[in-house]
Image (cartoon, rainbow, N blue to C red):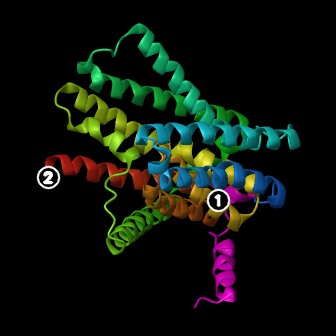
């Protein structure tokens, strides 16, 4: 039986572990106590994690009784999550209107809403123009969706760098002056996250004798690789750009930089950030496949905490993690 004192000691070790103080930390220190964790931290915890998680678990457990399809389950989950996010954003903003955007918390709440609205707008535009009405255009439709997502996330990144105080300067200075420290630490966290996450996940589904298959998030992204023709290679290039370069930066700004600021308690931030990262990647509602994403989010959160709140470390770690995944996915297409 694990003692309570041992758990406290473990979390204290996580809380206190960090790299040595360097000039970038002195010039651009990250404030882990920006807000009140018992107030603002709870707003984020319940609106972005607890309520969405309860909803998606409930929908999956009672899916048969409710007589809902997987597609409808995903839609209900997305709509309810947006509602919870919107309510949380309004409550948070009403308490902190002056710092809502400059702290990055506005981006945390706004990201899922903006992504959905942006995708919906360009989806409607494509339908109105009638570009993808033909079934033969499915491959081009996948490319179009990938482009839309890439543009949306680039806009979020640009907005974040323009709004969050000193974020751009801190990232530039880190890459310029601390590459020798940054790269090995980022690679180490990525490798551990990948192998621990996938190994533990495999052990759990083997022990419980589950046959979950590939997550719908992963399946949706990878299925276009199986088509033939030029579209396969166009999609592959865009997929690599989004997965290795754009998405990691965007997601780390949201799930680490903004969330840690909003929650304002290092240990609680690691827990909330890990769970939120998992929720971000199960938009289709397949909660049974959340575990690898939560583990990945946990190690990226540790990287952020270990680097004293330096976005560059968790961003680069996330990029290396995704690079490993992309290499394995592409290799599986050609190595039978």
Mark 1 or mark 2, whichever is nearer to me? 1
Q: Quadrant of residue 58?
A: bottom right
Q: Position of residue 84 (x, y in %)?
A: 68, 42
Numbered disc 1: secondary structure: helix
316 lies left or right of 173: left
Q: Nearer the viewer, residue 322 or 214?
A: 214
Q: Decide whether residue 282 is among the magenta residues.
A: no
Q: Residue drawn 68% across and 86% down? A: 4
Label 2: how many Cα within 10 Å (few below 14, some 14–19, many 20+)? few
Span highlighted in magenta in the image: 1-30
148 lies left or right of 174: left
**Farthest left residue in view:** 336
The residue at which mark 2 appears reads as 335
Q: Position of residue 307 (x, y in %)?
A: 62, 62
Q: Residue drawn 32% across and 14% down? A: 133
Numbered disc 2: secondary structure: loop
Label 1: how many Cα within 10 Å (few below 14, some 14–19, many 20+)? many
Which of the two labelled residues, at mark 1 and mark 2, occupies the earlier sequence position? 1
**Farthest top residue in view:** 129
The residue at which mark 1 appears reads as 272
Q: Nearer the viewer, residue 31 or 80?
A: 80
Q: Position of residue 11 (x, y in %)?
A: 66, 76
Q: Position of residue 27 (x, y in %)?
A: 74, 53
> Rounded to the nearest whole Å, what is the CA distance between mark 1 and mark 2?
38 Å
Q: Residue drawn 65% across and 70% down? A: 20
């Amino acid at each position: 039986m694990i003692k309570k004192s041992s758990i406290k000691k473990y979390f204290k070790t996580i809380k206190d572990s960090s790299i040595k103080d360097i000039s970038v930390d002195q010039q651009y220190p990250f404030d882990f106590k920006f807000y009140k964790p018992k107030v603002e931290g709870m707003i984020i915890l319940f609106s972005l994690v607890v309520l969405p998680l309860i909803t998606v678990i409930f929908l999956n457990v009672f899916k048969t009784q409710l007589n809902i399809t997987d597609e409808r389950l995903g839609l209900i989950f997305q709509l309810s999550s947006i509602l919870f996010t919107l309510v949380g954003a309004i409550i948070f903003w009403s308490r902190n209107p002056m710092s809502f955007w400059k702290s990055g918390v506005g981006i945390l709440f706004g990201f899922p809403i903006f992504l959905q609205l942006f995708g919906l707008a360009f989806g409607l535009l494509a339908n109105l123009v009638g570009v993808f009405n033909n079934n033969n255009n499915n491959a081009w439709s996948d490319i179009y969706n990938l482009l839309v997502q890439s543009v949306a996330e680039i806009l979020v990144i640009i907005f974040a760098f323009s709004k969050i105080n000193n974020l751009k300067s801190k990232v530039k200075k880190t890459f310029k002056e601390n590459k020798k420290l940054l790269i090995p630490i980022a690679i180490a966290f990525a490798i551990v996250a990948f192998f621990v996450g996938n190994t533990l996940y495999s052990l759990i589904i083997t022990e419980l004798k589950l046959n979950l298959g590939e997550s719908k998030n992963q399946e949706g992204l990878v299925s276009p690789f199986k088509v033939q023709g030029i579209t396969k290679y166009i999609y592959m290039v865009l997929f690599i750009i989004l997965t290795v370069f754009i998405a990691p930066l965007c997601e780390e700004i949201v799930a680490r930089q903004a969330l840690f600021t909003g929650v304002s308690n290092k240990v609680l931030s690691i827990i909330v950030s890990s769970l939120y990262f998992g929720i971000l990647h199960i938009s289709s509602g397949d909660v049974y496949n959340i575990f690898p994403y939560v583990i990945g989010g946990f190690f990226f959160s540790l990287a952020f905490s270990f680097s004293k709140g330096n976005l560059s470390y968790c961003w680069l770690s996330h990029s290396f993690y995704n690079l490993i995944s992309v290499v394995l996915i592409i290799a599986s297409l050609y190595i039978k």
